[in-house]
């Protein structure tokens, strides 16, 4: 896998059950270890920032394979705006779906943010785009062979 690591980050707001948010993050990331830090919102409301990281190739492949096939296609279709100049790849997962044990891309602000460091040589946005396109196309191909659903 040509991704060095995937970093996951989400927030547990004062109105949310912190344990549920942690379970959702563990479900989405597949990571066992979660780091937490306390923060404050704009109006002084308490927020717990939760982060997880995976770096093994097997874990990263499993993460992409856990997404619905339509979401992997959507990542591929929107790839140009998901990779930056530092070869970082970005996506957002629906935190509510993760609460319910489902994976899916998120559209609103209640998300689990995912950031991946793409390995490309030499390191450039163009090379990172080619690498991510290959990863996503390979994931789609494997899903199609297995008859995975949306």
Image (cartoon, rainbow, N blue to C red):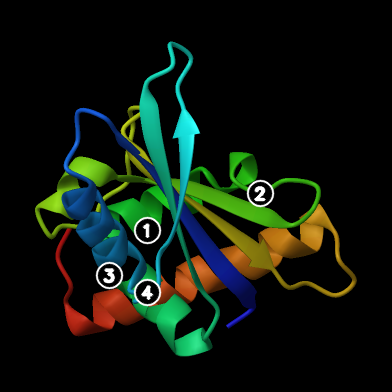
Mark earlier in primary sequence (4, 1): 4
Mark earlier in primary sequence (3, 1): 3
Q: How far across and how far down the image is residue 42, in percent?
A: 48, 14
Give the Cα separation between the discs numbered 2 and 3: 21 Å
Q: Which residue is mark 1?
A: 72
Check residue 83 in the rendering and tell me which mark sits there, or answer none.
2
Question: Of the residues tagged 2 and 1, which is closer to the observer?
Answer: 2
Determine the residue positioned at 16% across, 42% down.
Answer: 17
In the image, residue 30 above or below residue 25: below
Image quarter of residue 101: bottom left
SS at circle 1: helix
**Image quadrant in which the C terminus is located:** bottom left
Please give the count of numbered marks on the rendered protein.
Answer: 4
Determine the residue positioned at 68% across, 58% down.
Answer: 129
Q: How far across and how far down the image is residue 88, in percent?
A: 68, 55
Determine the residue positioned at 32% across, 52% down.
Answer: 71
Give the Cα separation between the discs numbered 4 and 3: 14 Å
SS at circle 2: loop
Question: Of the residues tagged 2 and 4, which is closer to the observer?
Answer: 4
Judged left or right of residue 8, residue 142 is: left
Question: Of the residues tagged 4 and 3, which is closer to the observer?
Answer: 4
The residue closer to the viewer here, 65 or 4, is: 4
Name the residue at the right extreme.
122
Question: Of the residues tagged 3 and 1, which is closer to the observer?
Answer: 3
Give the Cα separation between the discs numbered 4 and 1: 21 Å
């Amino acid at each position: 896998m040509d991704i060095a690591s995937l970093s996951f980050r989400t927030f547990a707001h004062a109105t949310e059950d912190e344990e549920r948010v942690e379970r959702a993050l563990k479900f989405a990331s597949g990571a066992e270890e979660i780091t937490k830090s306390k923060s404050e919102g704009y109006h002084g409301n308490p927020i717990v920032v939760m982060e997880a990281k995976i770096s093994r190739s097997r874990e990263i492949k499993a993460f992409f394979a856990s997404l619905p096939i339509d979401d992997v296609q959507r990542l591929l279709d929107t790839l140009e705006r998901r990779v930056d100049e530092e070869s970082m790849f970005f996506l957002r997962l629906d935190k509510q779906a993760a609460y319910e044990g489902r994976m899916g891309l998120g559209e609103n602000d209640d998300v689990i943010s995912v950031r991946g460091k793409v390995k490309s040589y030499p390191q450039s946005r163009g090379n990172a785009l080619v690498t991510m396109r290959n990863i996503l196309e390979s994931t789609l191909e494997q899903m199609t062979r297995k008859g995975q659903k949306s």
